[in-house]
Image (cartoon, rainbow, N blue to C red):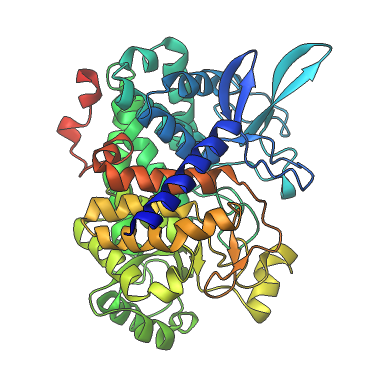
C-alpha cells in the first residue's frame, strides 16, 4: 500500500472511531450503549435506540480498547430490564427475555430506560436473538477482564438461568433446535424463515457454550446438565441435516417421500422437486459447501444465509472440514456472496411470485434489497473472524480492501442494494453504528487475531467445558 493510501486509510479509521464515540448513549451520566444510527437527515424512528444485537460489535471494540465500564454498564442496565416474574397477561414480555432495544427517556428532569420487547417494532415480533447476544457479550466481558466474579453475582446468575430456562424449556417439539417465528433475529421482517433458521441455531449454540462456562461455578447443576445434553445433539443435528455440498445434494436428490418409522432416511419428508438442483449443482464448488438456511417439516431452505454460516464457523458449530468448505464457497462464489460490498445477508433473493407470497409484497424487501439479499457491511467483521478462524486471511483482506474507502465516502450506510451491492440502500440510514463498528472490528481482528478469543469457541469438550472458573 502506497503512503498516500495509508494516510487515507488512517483518516478513515480516525473518522470511524470518532463516529463511534459520538454514538455512545449516556444514562444518569454513565455510558450504557450506542445508538443504532446517527443520521440526522431522517426522522429517528427507533434508530435512537440501543439494540442488543447491534451493540455486540461495539462491545467487543470497547473491550479491546480496555473501556470496560461501557460494557459493564450495558450489561447491568439491560439485566434490570429483564422480566423476572411470569405474568398471565399474554401481551406482557415473557420471564427471562432481554429486550430488543432500549432508549433513555427524560420525564420531569428524571431519566429512565424504556425497553422495547417488540411491542413497538414493525409487526410486533418478540426478539429471540437478544437473549443469546446478551450472554455472548457477558462471556466476552469476562474473558477480556478476567472478572468472573462479575458474572457470578446472584442477579447475573439468575439472569443467565432465566434465559437458559426459556431456551431449554419443554416444548411441543422434539428437536434440539429452537423453533422461532419470522422476524425474530437480524432478519426482522417476514422473509420465509419461520421454523428453525440457521442464524438463531448458531447464536443459540454460542450462547449455550458461553452459559456453560459462566454457570459452571454457580452450582446450578440442573441447567448445566441440560446444556451438556443439548450441545452435542444440536451440533450433530446442524452438521448433518443442514449441510449441503455436492455429495449431500446427490443423497437428497434420491430421497423417497412419505417414509415412516425408524428406517426412514428422509426424516423431514423433503419433497425433492422443491429443491433447485440444476442451479445448486452448477453453483456449488467441488470442495465447497454450506449450512442451509432452514430445515423443518417438508422444508429445506437452500438459501445461503451469511450470519448463520459465519457464526457456525466462529462458534465451532460447523466442523473444521465444513468451515473450510464454507470459506471455499465464499471464495469461489465471490461475486454472488460478496460482490462490491461485503457481504450479502442471504443469497439468492426471493423474486417474482415467491417474493410476493413469502414477504407479503414488502416494499422494503424488494429483490436484492434490505433483508432480501441486500449487502450489509456489518457482516464484514463476521467474515473477518471466520477467515481468521480458518486461516483464510486473504478472504478478509480482499473484503476489507473493497469496503474501507467506499464506506467512508458513502457516509457509512446501513445496507446496499443490487445484485452486486453497487447501490446505497434505498431506505438505508447513514452513519449506522454497526456499519462503523463492523469495519473497525474487522481492522482490529486483522491486526490482532488474538482478539478472536473473546467471542469464538473451539471444539466442544464436556470434560473441560467449565474452564471459566480458572479465568
Above or below: residue 444 compared with residue 108: below
Q: Residue furthest right?
A: 108
- Residue drawn 30% across the image and 65% down it: 326
Q: As rendered, which of 6 and 240 lies closer to the eye?
A: 6
- Residue drawn 32% across the image and 44% down it: 445
Tell me residue 468's x, y (percent): 25, 24
Q: Residue furthest bottom?
A: 278
Look at the image and tell me in which quarter the C terminus lies.
Answer: top left
* Residue 128 sits in quarter: top right
Tell me residue 158's x, y (percent): 46, 18
- Residue drawn 67% across the image and 35% down it: 49
* Residue 127 sits in quarter: top right
Q: Is residue 189 left or right of residue 456?
A: right
- Residue drawn 28% across the image and 22% down it: 216
Q: Is residue 343 left or right of residue 66?
A: right
Look at the image and tell me in which quarter the N terminus lies.
Answer: bottom left
Above or below: residue 9 compared with residue 341: above
**Res. 383 visible in picture:** no
Amino acid at each position: 500500500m502506497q503512503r498516500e493510501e495509508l494516510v487515507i486509510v488512517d483518516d478513515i479509521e480516525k473518522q470511524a472511531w470518532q463516529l463511534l464515540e459520538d454514538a455512545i448513549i449516556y444514562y444518569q451520566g454513565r455510558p450504557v450503549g450506542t445508538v443504532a444510527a446517527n443520521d440526522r437527515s431522517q426522522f429517528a424512528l427507533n434508530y435512537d435506540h440501543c439494540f442488543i444485537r447491534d451493540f455486540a460489535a461495539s462491545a467487543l471494540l470497547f473491550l479491546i480498547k480496555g473501556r470496560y465500564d461501557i460494557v459493564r454498564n450495558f450489561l447491568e442496565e439491560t439485566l434490570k430490564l429483564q422480566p423476572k416474574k411470569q405474568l398471565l397477561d399474554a401481551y406482557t414480555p415473557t420471564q427471562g427475555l432481554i429486550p430488543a432495544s432500549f432508549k433513555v427517556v427524560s420525564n420531569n428532569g428524571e431519566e429512565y430506560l424504556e425497553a422495547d420487547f417488540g411491542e413497538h417494532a414493525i409487526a410486533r415480533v418478540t426478539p429471540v436473538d437478544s437473549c443469546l447476544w446478551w450472554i455472548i457479550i457477558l462471556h466476552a466481558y469476562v474473558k477480556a477482564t478476567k472478572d468472573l466474579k462479575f458474572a457470578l453475582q446472584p442477579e447475573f446468575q439468575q439472569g443467565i438461568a432465566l434465559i437458559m430456562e426459556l431456551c431449554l424449556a419443554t416444548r411441543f417439539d422434539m428437536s434440539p433446535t429452537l423453533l422461532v417465528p419470522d422476524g425474530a433475529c437480524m432478519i426482522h421482517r417476514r422473509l420465509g424463515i419461520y421454523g428453525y433458521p440457521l442464524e438463531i441455531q448458531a447464536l443459540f449454540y454460542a450462547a449455550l457454550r458461553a452459559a456453560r462456562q459462566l454457570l459452571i461455578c454457580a452450582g446450578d447443576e440442573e441447567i448445566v446438565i441440560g446444556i451438556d445434553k443439548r450441545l452435542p445433539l444440536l451440533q450433530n443435528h446442524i452438521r448433518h441435516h443442514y449441510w449441503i455440498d455436492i455429495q449431500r445434494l446427490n443423497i437428497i436428490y434420491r430421497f423417497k417421500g412419505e417414509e415412516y418409522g425408524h428406517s426412514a432416511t428422509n426424516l423431514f419428508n423433503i419433497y425433492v422437486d422443491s429443491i433447485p438442483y440444476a442451479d445448486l449443482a452448477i453453483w456449488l464448488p467441488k470442495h465447497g459447501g454450506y449450512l442451509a438456511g432452514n430445515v423443518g417439516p417438508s422444508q429445506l431452505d437452500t438459501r445461503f444465509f451469511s450470519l448463520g454460516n459465519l457464526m457456525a464457523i466462529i462458534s465451532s458449530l460447523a466442523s473444521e472440514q465444513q468451515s473450510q468448505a464454507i470459506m471455499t464457497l465464499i471464495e469461489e462464489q465471490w461475486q454472488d456472496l460478496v460482490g462490491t460490498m461485503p457481504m450479502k445477508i442471504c443469497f439468492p433473493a426471493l423474486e417474482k411470485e415467491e417474493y410476493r407470497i413469502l414477504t407479503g409484497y414488502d416494499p422494503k424487501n424488494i429483490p436484492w434489497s434490505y433483508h432480501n439479499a441486500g449487502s450489509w457491511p456489518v457482516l464484514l467483521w463476521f467474515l473477518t473472524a471466520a477467515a481468521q478462524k480458518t486461516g483464510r486471511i486473504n478472504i478478509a483482506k480482499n473484503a476489507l480492501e473493497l469496503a474501507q474507502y467506499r464506506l467512508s465516502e458513502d457516509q457509512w450506510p446501513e445496507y446496499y442494494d443490487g445484485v452486486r451491492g453497487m447501490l446505497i440502500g434505498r431506505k438505508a440510514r447513514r452513519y449506522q453504528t454497526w456499519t462503523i463498528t463492523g469495519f473497525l472490528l474487522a481492522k482490529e481482528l486483522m491486526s490482532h487475531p488474538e482478539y478472536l478469543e473473546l467471542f469464538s469457541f473451539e471444539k466442544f469438550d464436556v470434560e473441560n467445558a467449565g474452564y471459566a472458573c480458572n479465568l
